Image (spheres, rainbow, N blue to C red):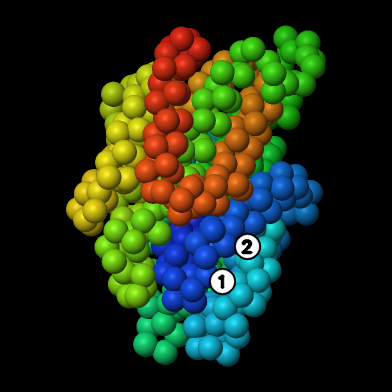
Amino acid sequence: MAVLFSVMLVAAAGNTAMQSILPAIGAKLHIPDVWVSLAFSWSALLWVLTAPHWARQSDKRGRKALMALGVVGFMASMALCGLTLWAGLQGYVAAGVTFIIFAVFRSLYGGFGSAAPPAVQAYVASRTDPEERTQALSLVSSSFGLGTVIGPAIAPFFILPFVGLSGPLLVFALIGLLVLIMLRWRLPDDMPRFAARGAIVAYPTAAGSPASATEEDENDGVPAEDDPGPARLRWTDKRVRPWLLAGFYGGQAQAMMLGVIGFLILDRLDMRLRPDEGAAMTGIVLMAGAFATLLAQWGLIPLLKLSARTAVLVGSALGASGLLMTGLSFDLHGIIIGFALASLGFGLFRPGFTAGASLSVPRRDQGSVAGMTASINGSAYIVSPAVGVLLYNWHPMVAYGLMAGFCGWLVLWGWSALRLDQPVAR
C-alpha cells in the first residue's frame, strides 16, 4: 500500500507544484500569461483523451506494467520540462522556443501519466477482499487529494541556487525515479484474485479533489439477475442531465479560478519583477485552497451528512462569495481568505455533483455515469483556464465576475432543477 500510495501521491503533487511556479516562470521569461495557461490546457486535453484508453489497457496488459508506464511518463515529463525551463531562464534558448518545447514535453505527462491512477485502483480492487475494498480504495484515492496539498507546499523549498525556478520539476523527477524503483522491486506481480476494472481518474489540479473512481464490488462484470440489458445511458437523459449541467457550470468557474490565481498574486502583490517570491506566495495560496477543499470533503460532508443537492447549492454560494472576495483583494491575507473560502465551496460542490449524478441512475448505469462525470471534470481544464486569463488581462473583475456569475446562476437554477435529496456518497 505504501508503494501504491506513493504512485498516486507523486502524480498529483508534481503537477500542482508545477502549477504554483509556472506563472512566475512565465513572468521571468516575459511570456504572455495566456500562453502559460495554455501549456496546462494542452496537458489536460491529452489526459482526458487518453485516460479511458489506459483504464481499459490496465485490465488487458497488467496493472503493474501500466503503473510503471504512468510513472515513467511523469518522470520524463518533469525532467525534460525542468531542463527546458532552466535553459530558457539561463538564456540558452529563446523564450518563445522554450515554451513550445515545454508544451511538447508536457504531453508526456498528459498522454502517459494518466496510465498510473486507474491501474493503481484496479490493482487494489483485484487483490482485496470485498469487505476491505472500500477502505483500501479510499486510502489510495486520498493520496491524490493529499498530493494537491503537498505539491504547492514544498515547491518553494526546491527553488535552488543553481537551477532556480526549474528546481521543483527536477526534484520531482528524481522522486518519480525513486517511486519507479520501489514499484519495480517491491510491488508484487498483479495476479488478480477478484475481477476489477480500471477507473477513469480526473486530471490532478490544485483544486485538491481526490481521484474520481467508480465503486467496485464482488459482482463487477456480472450482470444482475434482474438486469434487462437497457440501452446505454445518454447525455440527454432527463435523470442525469441537470447534474451534468451543474458540474459544467461549477467546473468552469473552478478551472478559471485556478488558471488566474497565480497571475493575480503577481499583480496584486507587485511581484512581476520578483517572480521567485511570487512563486512562494502562490504556493501558500494554493496550499490554503487545497486544505480548505479537503476540509470540506473529508470533514464537513461526512460530519454534516449533507445531501447532494445541499452540497451543490451551499458550495456554489460559498464559491461565489470567495471568488468576489479574491477578485477585490489587494493584499496576501485577503487573497488567501477569499481563495480558501471559494475552495471550501468547490470542495462541497464537486462531491455533491458527482454523488447526485450517481444517485440519479440505477446500479447498472454507474459505469456510464462515472465516465460522464470524469469527462465533465477533466474537460473544464482544457479551455476555461486560458479564457479566464484572457478576461483577467482585459479586466480582473470581468474574469472574477464571470466566475461568480457561474456560481450564482448555479444556485438560482439548481434550486428548482436539482431535486434529488439523498446523502452524499463517500
Q: Determine which quarter of the picture holds residue 372.
A: top right
User: Image height check: is 319 above or below 393?
Assistant: above
Left or right of 381 in this view: 154: left
User: Image height check: is 189 above or below 415?
Assistant: below
Contact, mark 1 vs mark 2 (Cβ under 8 Å): yes
Which of the two residues, 178 or 203, is positioned nearer the viewer here?
A: 203
Residue annotated with mark 1: 78
Residue annotated with mark 2: 109
Residue 260 x/y as whole percent: 43, 52
Which of the two residues, 27 or 252, is positioned nearer the viewer here?
A: 27
Q: Determine which quarter of the picture holds residue 177.
A: bottom right
Residue 44 x/y as whole percent: 61, 52
Instruction: Give me the disc on residue 361.
Output: none
Which image quarter is the C terminus in?
A: top left
Residue name at image x 31 percent, y 55 percent: 285
Which of the two residues, 13 or 125, is positioned nearer the viewer here?
A: 13
Assess disc 2: are there few (<14), some (14-19) or many (≥20) residues with their C-alpha within 10 Å of its C-alpha: many
Left or right of 265 in this view: 422: right
Please name the amino acid that badge 2 sits on: Tyr
Residue 160 x/y as whole percent: 37, 83
Q: Earlier in the sequence, mark 1 or mark 2?
A: 1
Residue 252 x/y as whole percent: 52, 38
Left or right of 208 in this view: 33: right
